[in-house]
Image (tube, coloured by chain):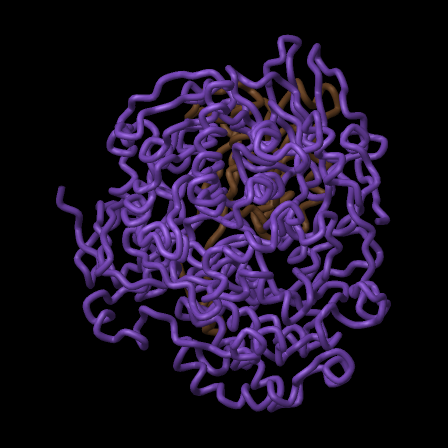
Chain colours: A brown, B purple
Amino acid sequence: MKALLIDARWCYGCHGCELACQTEHGMKVGENGIVVTQIGVWPYEDKGGAEKWQHSYLPVPTDQCDACAARTSEGELPTCVKHCFANCLRFGEVEELAKGLTDAKQCLYVIEK
Amino acid sequence: METIAAGQGFPLHTRKDGETVTRTSAWTAPGCHNGCGIKIHTDDQGNVTKIEGDEATPFNQGRLCARCFAVPDALAADDRLLYPLKRAREDRGKDKFERITWDEAYDLIEATFNDIKEKYGAESVIFQQGTGRDITPYITRLSWSFGSPNFGGVGQSGDSCYLPRIAGMVGTLGGFWLADYSQQFVDRFDNPEWRAPGVIFNVGVNLLVSNSDGVMGYWMVECLKRGSKLINVDPKITWLSSRADLVLRPRPGTDGALAMGMINYLIENDLYDKDFVDKWCYGFEQLAERAKEYPLSKVAAITWLAEDDIVRATRMIVEDGPAALQWGLAADSSNAEAVPAAHAMQTVFQITGNVDVPGGMIMPTDILPGGYAGGWGRELISQEQLAKKIGIKKYPMYAFATPYTESEEVLKVLESGEPYELHACWNQTMNPISCMAPEPERVLRAFQKLDFFVDVTPYMTPTTMALADVVLPVCLFPERNGVALTTGSQRAAAMVKVTEPRGESKSDQQINLELGKRFNPKGWPWDTVEEMFTEMIKPTGYTFEELCEVSPVLPAFQYRKYEKGLLRPDGQPGFNTSTGRIELWCGMFQSIGQDPLPYYEEVRPGPLATPDLYEKYPLILTTGVRRWTTFHSEHRNMPRMRAIVKEPLAQMNPADAEKYGVKDNDIVELYNNNGKAHMRLRVTPEIMEGNIQTDHAWWFPEGDPEDLYGVMDVNVNNLCEYDCGKHGFGTNIKAQLCAVRKYEE
């Protein structure tokens, strides 16, 4: 199964993946194969009483994501993966990617069975 | 100059799916001044079909941001200017342009400029450009070869975007420095000589969405991944704050006081690098004496920071080093006394020995002598004409530290006609009315006095509509050749033409060359722009055509150049200052009648400097919040970008919103003694209480041209005022005062 490993520790919400996707696939303004969602911003106290901030992003593939089948069939990376500034996306077989799950805030998104 | 060609072995052109793919770089228009490496796909009709990142360019390593993906749309946009235009002077502000030929346009400009030169002197024509374009070398050359010393950019107060620190560092450091993110190496983060900074002190910048120093925000994230600690100094909670080891939220405009307090703490507690200071710094005793004026309690009161946090930040710089200073443009533009503030900030990293060392601050080698902002062709103008440069008597640093004129001084000459009248303006890729001029109505009135205004621009802008008598259409970067000699750690990257310019548009460089030849043929001895580029990049040893094949080219880099005699023209060890040392006590400042030591001066207007105003206008206004999808006043006409950010925003803390009776999503009016502007409000705890932050440079291309596209309604610069400080470098545009209320139409 093809999947994306999304490392939400490092996504900082630049929208680059959205535009890479939208233009790669000739989509209309308003459509996309991946959308960056924002979680936060709010303050909270950690267990030691120190002020922390919830401020993170999670890029989420949409129904229109085909993991750039045309690109990957020629050995290229999906355009969102290639262009991600934070380098927080990986593409591959789910079993392989699962081995790379080593930290908190990482997730796998299965694109196709 | 020894160089390394990063693009060697990566073909300029390849074919893929029946299309041509060309390796090139992106630099205005449209877009920013980073010059990312890109690959442009064109079909056999020459249409640009796709843009991708170029893996062979170490600068961006194949990655790319939202704006470059919209370049194909920018090329095809309906509102591109395709032909030269003219308009009768009395019709300024009216949509009454008529198409003319290039010959007619050039004839008219040549005749009018030369007539003005004959009657009033060449100095009565000013040449100005917008920030971040790749045209500084050519437009300085145009100005100087015409005979005018008045090259500049009437807009920001005191060249406050970045130049205060640059001008100041000429005197203190004898050069330029910036944080070490491995940008000077082709193999980047894998380079064996490089190490990630132990700690990064990020002050006054949301580096991920904005930048100075030609730095890409993601480099900082790559350093965090490699273990760098982060001290984030920003009143706003940004993503970087949420990942930082220490967050400092100072009152806007007080960064200089923080730095003075840190210097004092370092010296009082013997934490500075004595060996480095003894060997390489000048004036330490005087600095120590000055620093005593900034005890922790006083600095905490000025900055609104906790004493403990100031101590912790200072200790982290020593204990977790090497330490890198990432200073944003807010360091130059939130206090008119920006030069002493920059002096203080750099001093912290100098007396701790973080100079030209891996993971500290590096001093890169320039390809273009004087750097990208230094100007090109100064030998073409006489000393007699240079002596007439506006503002140099009041602000002597403008005589040698920058090719620019000081903005408000130009404005005053425009208004008063003293010491001489100004009659014409060459305005190239610049939109001051919406972008960065404080008091924009005043600027507009002053410019209306000119007999003749030429605007060189790819799109119609509020400035064009308000002022232009002649409009010259500029093509976009995929339609021209060029050289990206970028800011920061300089590299030479070729910009390769992949498609014909639309309509009759021409490149900035072509226009400058063609008009330059008419004014001063000897100053422009080249038949083509490519010959001109070859001359400019001579230090690299490459011709323009050769550069295209191997681009980008990086100067070879060594650390600790001051130990090796690589910074001074005489080849001696040390720094390129008059004492050969880093001048903590600066002889250059002394010689122009300025304080030779760093200091903090209270930001004005402000809670402490103008308490009466603060009572009436109780919020500190910070302008110029950056967005992913816009570069200054650009990109408002691009639907993919507008879909992400459709309108300007003001942002404030929930407690303040409640206090002043406004709600999230309201349209609010910001107002003060200077003026007003209205925009959508976002209420968020990211913003510090007592602070309100807004976007800048907004206008609405879809709006009424004769209302100047609605620019004055939303222009937060209406609330800002000119004040360029004692040195003539600086501004308070990120720390004004204002009040807020719900907007009633």
Q: Residue furthest left?
A: B744
Residue at 82% of width from left, 36% of height from top? B542
Query: Is residue B518 among the parts visible in the rendering?
Result: yes
Q: Which of B306/B607 is in front?
A: B607
Q: Which of B213/A13 is in front?
A: B213
Residue B316 pos. (x, y %): 62, 75
The image shows residue B421, relative to residue B178, as above or below, that is: above
Left or right of residue B109, residue A76 in this image = right
The image shows residue B540, relative to residue B683, as above or below, that is: above
Q: Tell me the quarter of the image containing the C terminus of chain B.
A: top left
Residue at 26% of width from left, 30% of height from top? B90
Residue B34 pos. (x, y %): 61, 43
Left or right of residue B658, residue B25 in this image = right
Please give the count of numbered marks on the rendered protein: 0
Residue at 22% of width from left, 56% of height from top? B671
The image shows residue A64, relative to residue B328, as above or below, that is: above
Residue B669 pos. (x, y %): 21, 50
